[in-house]
Amino acid sequence: MALELRDVTKTLGAETHIYPTSLKFEAGGFNILLGATNAGKSTLIKLMAGLEKPTTGEVWVEGQNVTGVLPQKRQIALVHQFFVNYPHMTVFENIASPLRVQRMSRSDIETRVRAAADVLQLGPMLDRRPQELSGGQQQRCALARAIVKESKAIFLDEPLANLDYKLREELREQLPDILGERGTVVVYATSEPTEALLLGGKTALVHEGRVTQVGRTTEIYHMPTDLTSARVFSDPPINFAPVTKKGDEIWMGESITWPVAGDVAALPDGPFTVAIRPHHITPFKSDQASVEIHGPVKITELSGSESVAHFEINGEIWVSMSRGVFPFRVGEMCKFHMTPDDCFYFRPDGQLVAKGRRNG
Amino acid sequence: MRPRSVVPIIYILFLLLPIYWLVAMSFKTTNEILGGFSLFPQEWTLDNYREIFTDPTWYWGYINSILYVTINTVISLAAALPAAYAFSRYRFLGDKHLFFWLLTNRMAPAAVFALPFFQLYSAVGLFDTHLAVALAHCLFNIPLAVWILEGFMSGVPKELDETAYVDGYSFPRFFATIFIPTIKAGVGVAAFFCFMFSWVELLLAKTLTAVEAKPIAATMTRTASSAGYELGLLAAAGVLTIIPGAIVIYFVRNYIAKGFALGRV
């Protein structure tokens, strides 16, 4: 089973929602669309599902052109960010509805609905109405309706975004089991880089209507091909700064410098952009090759056991994130450490040209 | 009785006074009504009601009214449901203007339309039929129903439609078995307002009918007949006219509260 977009574009009036895009998704594992809100993930899903017609280009499923085929005929399933259920039907009727439309026999429907309900732990709630369920259960009901029928593709459009933290983690852990190995293409849109990493599989980065990079999730995390992809696949946002290579040294501003190593040594002298992930900037010295940087702290956040500090350096705001609780004070000059091996180097046009020796 | 409940009780008594007077009158004889002030019927009589239920010119008034009100409600909803769906789901050229224009239809007094309707219906042979009144009332009721239903429909996320299509529902099936049940409160509220406006509207109903489809309100407003003043009879007719509205309100009271909550009614 495979799902393909071939040079698909979508324009609405003068606005371009999707620039020419070709994507191929296979069955097995998650196919993740990662991008910020309004990046075009939902539009891509609607195009694949047939809910919107591409302006140009084609959609292929299993070697067949389905561009003009109605969503009703495509044998697909869809789960939205909002918990969409049919409010006047019970949970049982909700899950059964796609099967009833297919005129499946009563006993088959009964068996399948019960099986799907068991997988999603909805067994005791079958006679209730969706609005009597908690948010998590409502979304489980929507998921059950998506997996109850045979479908060629299942689309999940930020299915966990409206759940609270605890439920989100719980359901995310169960998702691979729920969707199982069913020979179905699973497309999962999310705006959270962490979620993409946790689910693994393959990821396509989406930014302002363009797919910037596609590949195995961990690979593209470790090797963003350009600045945009690096920015999309980092949370908190990745830190950037202009640097200059002069001989054997990299200079960031007037005062910060480190020696070149590995691939970086082969670069010609000149301006580059360096990028480093927030968790590689720590308030403690972690490595022999550590570079010391200073800056006034602007904002501090403490999330669970992680300390986040936003600080200013050479006019840029950088973010440091580290495990443990550190007593940052707003307005205070703080010392941070980074390792050149963790840096990505981009050309002025945004293409990745070199990276430090360590992975991501 | 606690002091703070005094004011509402007085207010409610004040509101109910004319209705009480009407009900009391309906059980009096005309002589007693004309005879002077009496708080209760001195001599209870059911003759007024008996007269209405046995005299065809009276009870056909009710049947005629109920017939054209029902036809009007059905036509209004049948036309307004698809129209409201289009307004809530699609963007098309001039949609906002059209929507506003629909509402402006309600801003002209019915008297303005009485003459053109009268002439038109006479010319095409619709005069003095139930359909004539029902169609004339559509002029007010369809825009109103579209407006109410559009509010309820816009409260339903578009994702519901998409989910249903993906689940395999065709559009007509989705509309009938999923969408309408989802907004049934709105359908209830719209039907109620269509019923109410059509039931209380007198001018067009009176102008467009003569004998065959004469509404109760027209029958009732002839104050004197060959037998002189029949005030008791008119009061009884008035009581019977209030009842259908009261019954309908009882059934849709919760939906109307919801309609107010959605800010459309």
Image (cartoon, rainbow, N blue to C red):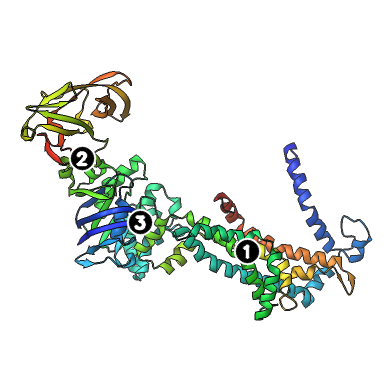
- Of the residues shown, which amino acid type is indicated by label 2? Leu
Disc 3 target residue: A12
A227 up-or-down from B264: above or below: above
- Of the residues shown, which amino acid type is indicated by label 3? Leu
* Label 2 close to label 3 by CB (< 8 Å): no
Disc 1 target residue: B140
Indicate the chain on which mark 2 is placed.
Answer: A
B51 up-or-down from A112: above or below: below
Q: Residue at x 45, y 63 (%)?
A: B178
Mark 2–mark 1 distance (CA, rounded to whole Å): 60 Å
Crowding near the residue tagged with mark 1, few <14, some 14–19, many ≥20 C-alpha atoms within 10 Å? many
Disc 2 target residue: A227
Residues marked 1 and 3, same chain: no
* Label 2 close to label 1 by CB (< 8 Å): no
B131 up-or-down from A96: above or below: below
Residue depth check, mark 1 versus mark 3: number of the one nearer the observer? 3
Quadrant location of the N terminus of chain A in the rendered image: bottom left
Q: Residue at x 36, y 50 (%)?
A: A81
Residue A121 on image: x %, y %: 33, 52
Asked if residue A147 shows in the view, the reply is no
Mark 2–mark 3 distance (CA, rounded to whole Å): 28 Å
Asked if residue B161 shows in the view, the reply is yes
Q: Is residue B262 left or right of residue A342?
A: right
Residue A139 on image: x %, y %: 36, 51
